[in-house]
Image (cartoon, rainbow, N blue to C red):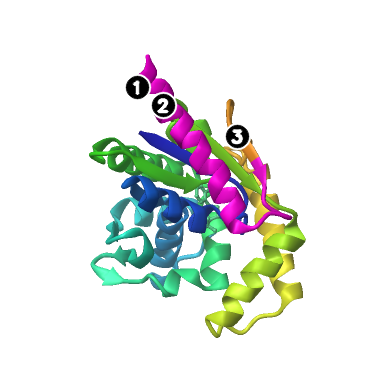
Amino acid sequence: MIIAIDGPSGAGKSTLGKMLAKEFGLLYLDTGAMYRAAALAVIKKGVSLEDREKVAEIAENAKIELVGEPDSMQVLLDGEDVSAEIRTPDVATAASVVSTISDVRKIMVDHQRAIGESAAKGCVLEGRDIGSVVFPNADIKFFLTAKPEARARRRFAEDQAKGRATSYEKTLDEINKRDERDVSRSDSPLTIPQNATVIDTSELELNDVFELMILKVKALAAGSTAG
Ligand code: DC
């Protein structure tokens, strides 16, 4: 079973994706973490994000691995644990630039398909182009969204809890800029995939969204055994 979760940053994709993966014993793949790791590789090499050819070459040669259980997943870049380093606002911004490069996207998409297809029981993948490009035939597609202010509030609270220095205004500004880049890029822009269930999480509690998602998955499982 392939479950695709797409949507803008801060809509709850990661938290809910992990919860779903655990609930149904599926592999969890955070595809944004892969773009972040590629961006970090570029930063570490001191290469300009404007140099698209070099950036693609670095992404191609970087060894990016996601290992462990959903809650304790580690992101390895060339064998080094970069799980914390890829979560900084600078890397987030760099990832949104790197992810506009088609050659980078091709490498990431191939990698994501291979991981999803080889997962024994199935996989929950979350990102921006999962239901539209990576797995257009996914069994279930969710599109999670929320107002920018709600997403900025959540991201800011998360950053504060982790001791990262930032402000709500700065977080909102970054979210707006990333949204703009995600929806306006020419290759695989963030869109609502065909047949996706759209959930606006602005006013909903996490568990209410989770219940909605579980119902969808159970309905699919019941349908496939009934036939
Ligand atoms: O979900 P995230 O914030 O960790 O993603 C980091 C960046 O990567 C974000 O700007 C959008 C991009 N991304 C993408 O283009 N396609 C994906 N499937 C996942 C993330």
Q: Earlier in the sequence, mark 3 or mark 2?
A: 3
For disc 1, the neighbor class at 10 Å (few under 14, some 14 to 19, many from 20) is: few
In this figure, which residue is indicated by the disc labeled 2? 222
Q: CA distance from mark 3 to mark 2?
A: 18 Å
208 is within the stretch colored magenta: yes
The number of callouts visible is 3
Please name the residue shown 62% across and 48% down the image: 182
Amino acid, disc 3: Thr
For disc 3, the neighbor class at 10 Å (few under 14, some 14 to 19, many from 20) is: some
The one of 128 and 157 positioned closer to us in this rendering: 157
In this figure, which residue is indicated by the disc labeled 3? 197
The one of 198 and 192 positioned closer to us in this rendering: 198
The quarter in which the N terminus is drawn is top left
Residue 46 visible in the shown view: no
* Residue 172, position as x, y percentages in the image: 73, 66
Please name the residue shown 48% across and 29% down the image: 219
Q: Secondary structure at mark 2?
A: helix
The one of 202 and 164 positioned closer to us in this rendering: 202
Residue 84 visible in the shown view: yes
Q: Earlier in the sequence, mark 3 or mark 1?
A: 3
The answer to whether residue 11 is above or below residue 199 is below
Please name the residue shown 42% across and 64% down the image: 42
Q: Is residue 81 left or right of residue 176?
A: left
Asked if disc 2 and disc 1 are in contact, CB closer than 8 Å, the reply is yes
Q: Of the residues tagged 3 and 1, which is closer to the observer? A: 1
Asked if disc 3 and disc 2 are in contact, CB closer than 8 Å, the reply is no
Q: CA distance from mark 2 to mark 1?
A: 5 Å
Amino acid, disc 1: Thr
* Residue 220, position as x, y percentages in the image: 45, 28
Q: Secondary structure at mark 1?
A: helix
In this figure, which residue is indicated by the disc labeled 1? 225
